[in-house]
């Protein structure tokens, strides 16, 4: 790699005009008609047809991407909201039936079998068949409504602020106070954040009930027993089943929850409190001031690039290119949607990172996480078809969660003080262990929600508490906070925006621990395994991609026990 930064150019178009921009369905339609009318009389023509379709889909995907990015960066901008809505309501529904016709045309060509032995095509064909199986014309309207309703969650969340000491703060900014060594300040911040969320609890409850009803309708329209089964097919989960998820839940309850209890028992003792309350969970238990990883978004960007560069110059260049192109929006502000994401931009191949940074260590690990996703996009950008560049989510999250751990060796860039560095690493390992029960909580909750789609809002609260109690520690005292706990699930945007996208975090977290273990044994070999796996994109199965990284796709109780023992041993070494 040279030191000179090369900003990628958009690939030269061969099917659509260079100046083409998506304005309406009418200006897109001729290209779909063209693909439908093309005769495929040879393997060569089929290959060109696939490239043409990939080009069209990449352009459309990137246009939608920018509309979504602008809307989430500025939820209070009516023009951006309308632009996104226009795509969802007037363009996407028109594309859906054409995509189905193109899928059927592709499935019917006899030349497709000639490609099956080439990397990626067996996965492409497998996904093609399930897409044809699931498509129903009647669901176009249903999913348009779902997408419109989903958008409301970002708007509601983006508008949430609290006033503390005369300052208006986003909930993310207020959350920083939960690390204060002043317990009264922590309690005040916790209560204000909770009160603000609960102010919209009924609106969010009604919105969620509406989404469950619509999703159940979509599943029934597609002749699926429930929306869970629909999503397992839609996501292409060929490598594991709902029962495997239940086994994962059992293993987490048995192997990980007791470790959380140990941590919180120690935390309570160190804090010297009669009862450990929810606002005592983020503060340093030894009474140290919160770790501050950076000053502002500019500092975070520069330090992140330096960190990635020390791991591997290629990784640093990925973030540098994004920064140079304006593909980073990192700081928290009013009117910005919650959470963080890395959005792949299919045509240019350079993704966009969105997050809500304040100054905390968690913000630093968030950019490590999203940066891992970004590196994944860079490593797959030269693959020949858009389908090949879209990895299964279990692999996408492996890229991000592994980067959180691999990067730890370079965290002295953020924490030059050795004691702070050790503390940061301990917090990261604790956070990893705490992530797994929360993943199991959200995933088990979702299975019940969609297996019982006609449940009442009261039944939902009862079941939420049953699941929450299974995976939470027994040390934290929730007395007097029943309503806060009852609606805790409403803060999890995945439930509203990307249903059933959560178990992947658990599976990938296990994979990331295994990959980190390899990296610690041999940095060069471990990093090669990481990059080799990511380069595969969607060319092969999940187990094969994990194998390329030198790890197992396994979430059995025995394997979880083995990995947790490794993490505990590493924790003691720090």
Image (spheres, grey):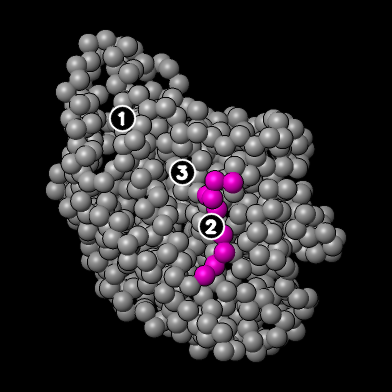
From the viewer's perspective, is 105 left or right of 483? left
Above-or-below relation of 265 to 302: below
CA neighbours of label 3 inside 10 A, class few (<14), some (14 to 19), many (20+): many
CA neighbours of label 2 inside 10 A, class few (<14), some (14 to 19), many (20+): some
Query: Disc 1 or disc 3, which is closer to the eye?
Result: 1
x and y, in percent, of residue 218 in the image? 21, 52
Q: Earlier in the sequence, mark 1 or mark 2?
A: 1
For label 3, the residue is 344
Per the model, the C-alpha gap separating discs 3 and 2 is 14 Å
Residue furthest front as drawn: 19
x and y, in percent, of residue 281 in the image? 64, 75
Residue 365 occupies which quadrant of the picture? bottom right
Numbered label attached to residue 16: 1
x and y, in percent, of residue 202 in the image? 32, 79
From the viewer's perspective, is 423 left or right of 326? right
Kindly tell me whether residue 113 is visible in this rendering.
Answer: yes
Per the model, the C-alpha gap separating discs 1 and 3 is 21 Å
Residue furthest right as drawn: 418
Residue drawn at x 55%, y 30% as measured from the top left? 535
Q: Earlier in the sequence, mark 3 or mark 2?
A: 2
């Amino acid at each position: 790699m040279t030191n000179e930064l090369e900003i990628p150019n958009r690939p030269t178009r061969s099917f659509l005009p260079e100046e083409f921009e998506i304005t309406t369905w009418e200006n897109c339609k001729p290209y779909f008609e063209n693909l439908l009318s093309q005769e495929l009389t040879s393997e060569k023509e089929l290959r060109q047809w696939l490239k043409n379709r990939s080009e069209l889909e990449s352009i459309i995907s990137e246009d939608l991407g920018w509309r979504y990015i602008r809307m989430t960066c500025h939820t209070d901008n009516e023009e951006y909201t309308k632009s996104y809505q226009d795509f969802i309501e007037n363009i996407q529904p028109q594309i859906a039936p054409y995509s189905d016709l193109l899928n059927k045309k592709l499935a019917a060509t006899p030349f497709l079998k000639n490609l099956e032995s080439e990397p990626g095509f067996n996965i492409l064909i497998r996904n093609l068949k399930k897409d044809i199986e699931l498509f129903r014309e009647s669901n176009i309207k249903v999913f348009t409504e779902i997408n419109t309703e989903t958008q409301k969650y970002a708007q509601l969340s983006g508008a949430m602020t609290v006033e503390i000491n005369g300052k208006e703060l986003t909930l993310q900014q207020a959350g920083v106070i939960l690390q204060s060594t002043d317990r009264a300040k922590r309690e005040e911040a916790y209560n204000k954040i909770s009160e603000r969320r609960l102010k919209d609890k009924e609106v969010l409850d009604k919105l969620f009930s509406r989404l469950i009803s619509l999703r159940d309708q979509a599943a029934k329209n597609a002749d699926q027993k429930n929306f869970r089964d629909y999503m397992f097919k839609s996501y292409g989960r060929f490598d594991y089943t709902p029962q495997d998820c239940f086994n994962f839940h059992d293993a987490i309850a048995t192997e990980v929850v007791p470790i959380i209890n140990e941590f919180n028992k120690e935390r309570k003792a160190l804090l010297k409190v009669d009862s450990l309350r929810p606002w005592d969970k983020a503060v340093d238990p030894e009474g140290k001031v919160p770790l501050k990883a950076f000053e502002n978004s500019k500092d975070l960007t520069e330090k992140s690039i330096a960190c990635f560069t020390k791991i591997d110059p290629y990784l640093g260049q990925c973030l540098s290119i994004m920064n140079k192109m304006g593909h980073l929006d990192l700081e928290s502000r009013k009117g910005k949607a919650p959470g963080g994401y890395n959005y792949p931009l299919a045509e240019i191949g350079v993704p966009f990172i969105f997050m809500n940074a304040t100054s905390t260590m968690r913000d630093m690990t968030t950019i490590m996480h999203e940066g891992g996703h970004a590196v994944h996009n860079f490593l797959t950008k030269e693959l020949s078809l858009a389908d090949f560049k879209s990895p299964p989510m279990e692999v996408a999250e492996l890229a991000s969660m592994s980067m959180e751990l691999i990067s730890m060796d370079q965290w002295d860039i953020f924490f030059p003080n050795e004691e702070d560095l050790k503390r940061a690493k301990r917090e990261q390992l604790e956070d990893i262990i705490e992530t797994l029960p929360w993943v199991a909580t959200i995933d088990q909750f979702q299975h019940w929600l969609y297996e019982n789609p006609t449940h009442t809002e009261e039944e939902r609260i009862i079941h939420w508490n049953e699941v929450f109690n299974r995976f939470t520690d027994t040390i934290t005292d929730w007395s007097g906070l029943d309503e806060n706990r009852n609606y805790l699930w409403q803060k999890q945007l995945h439930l509203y925006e990307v249903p059933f996208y959560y178990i992947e975090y658990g599976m990938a977290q296990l994979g990331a621990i295994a990959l980190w273990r390899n990296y610690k044994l041999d940095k060069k070999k471990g990093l090669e395994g990481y990059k080799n796996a990511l380069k595969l994109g969607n060319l092969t199965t999940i187990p094969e991609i994990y194998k390329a990284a030198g790890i197992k796709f396994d979430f059995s109780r025995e394997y979880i026990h083995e990995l947790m023992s490794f993490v505990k041993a590493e924790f003691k070494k720090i």
